[in-house]
Image: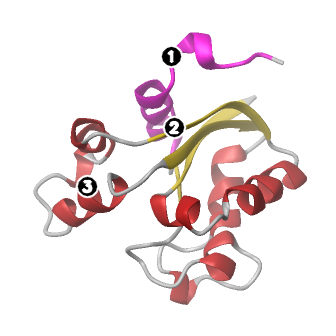
Amino acid sequence: MERTFAMIKPEGVARGLVGAIIQRIERKGYRIVALKMLRLTPEMAARHYAEHQGKPFYGALVDHITSGPVVAMVLEGPGVIAGLRRMMGPTNPQDAPPGTIRGDFALEVGQNVIHGSDSPASAEREIALFFSPAELTDK
């Protein structure tokens, strides 16, 4: 069974979208195996966005993701990495069709409501960054 990491970003939490987003994930049939609300420190954000260090938008990414609480989760299901990416829609909400999370809830690239791992390697790295093995449920 495949696992992925997902995070509802500060604007999603602030706008009260956590329940609506989780409901979509569960209705799809994906199982939540870990879930917590936290506020990222700049150090955690730096580790999470390590691949973007040195890019012009890096500082804005870190500032945004540390601006308020987030909801981090680990999801499990067949093809969950690609499936969640389809549910989220394109990074730019202007390109995201209605029915996707970003198409329905987000207005701009810098505040696109949700993050999801883009590959098995990213999922493994991000899950380990946010959750200890003891925090992951088996059933």
86 up-or-down from 23: above or below: below
104 up-or-down from 64: above or below: below
Residue 11 is situated, as x and y percent measured from the top left of the image, at: 49, 66
Q: Find disc 3 in the rendering and name its residue.
A: 62
N-terminal label among 2 and 1: 2
Q: Which mark is residue 19?
A: none
Whole-angstrom CA distance, mark 2 to mark 1, is 14 Å
Quadrant position of residue 133: top right
Which type of secondary structure does the marked residue at label 3 adopt?
A: helix
N-terminal label among 1 and 3: 3
Q: Find disc 2 in the rendering and name its residue.
A: 123
Q: Which residue lies at the image location 45% right of the left edge and 35% below the top edge?
A: 126
Residues in magenta, as a range: 119-138
Q: Amino acid at mark 3?
A: Val
Whole-angstrom CA distance, mark 3 to mark 2, is 19 Å
Residue 32 is situated, as x and y percent measured from the top left of the image, at: 75, 36
Residue 108 is situated, as x and y percent measured from the top left of the image, at: 45, 83
Which residue occupies the extreme left position in the image?
54
N-terminal label among 3 and 2: 3
Q: Find disc 1 in the rendering and name its residue.
A: 132
Which residue occupies the extreme bottom position in the image?
94
- In the foreground, 118 or 32: 32
